[in-house]
Image: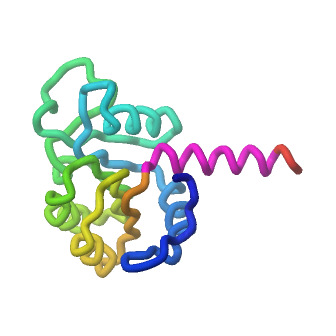
Amino acid sequence: MTDTTARSGAGAQPHLADDIARALAMRHVAAVGFSDKADRASHYVSIYLANAGYRVIGINALIVHKRDLPLSVVESLSDMPPPIEIVTVFRQSEELPEIAEAAIGRGARVLWLQKGITHPEAAARARAAGLIVIEDRCMLQEHADAERRRVQASDSE
């Protein structure tokens, strides 16, 4: 789904398109759950973002000591050098309360939950702390859609 309008019903995000645009303008990303396996979304989304000009650091204690990783990887959010603007999450929804608290504690500005990831309580806690929260959206897809719209707009001028 590429539509960035608000979803209706409970949990709707009435300013989703604006939130996505603001988030995509930020450049420092912590990819929580980054994988060293190229076929995993956490891997190829993170690589895409890095190639698009974002500073992406993977967060994964299990692979932090592996060599020849395509990105820098640290053990936890507390190990990531500042600034942390976007915390994009590729972990199970039940892990979100702890991740949201860590993002809040590190001064992140955005909590971006990738496709299939939602947690109403963690999202509400992050919003209450002033973070932009984007749930169940692929950052790669949203960035690519924004770039496509930008190019189309410049071509029509």
Q: Nearer the viewer, residue 116 or 56?
A: 116
Does residue 84 show up?
no
How far across and how far down the image is residue 120, in percent?
Answer: 26, 72
Q: Nearer the viewer, residue 40 or 22?
A: 40
> Residue at 35% of width from left, 52% of height from top?
114
Q: In the figure, is residue 117 to the left or right of 13? A: left
Q: How many marks can you see?
A: 0
Considering every residue shown, the one lying at the far top of the view is 68
> How is the rendered protein coloured?
rainbow
Magenta residue span: 138-154
Residue 114 colored magenta? no
Work out whether 105 lies above or below 76: below
Residue 33 position, x and y percent, is 22, 43
Q: Main secondary structure of the magenta part?
A: helix
Which residue is outermost to the right?
157
Percent across and percent down for residue 124 are 28, 77
Q: Quadrant of residue 113?
A: bottom left
Q: Residue at x 30, y 45 (%)?
A: 31
- Above-or-below relation of 127 to 30: below
Within the image, what quadrant is residue 70 found in?
A: top left
Residue under the image location 48 percent in, 55 percent down: 26
- Return the residue nearer the eye: 43 or 116: 116
Front one among 130 and 80 = 130
Residue at (33%, 33%) from the top-left corner?
Answer: 43
- Regarding residue 105, the answer to whether it shows in the image is yes
* Image location of residue 119, percent across then percent down: 25, 67
Q: Is residue 150 magenta?
A: yes
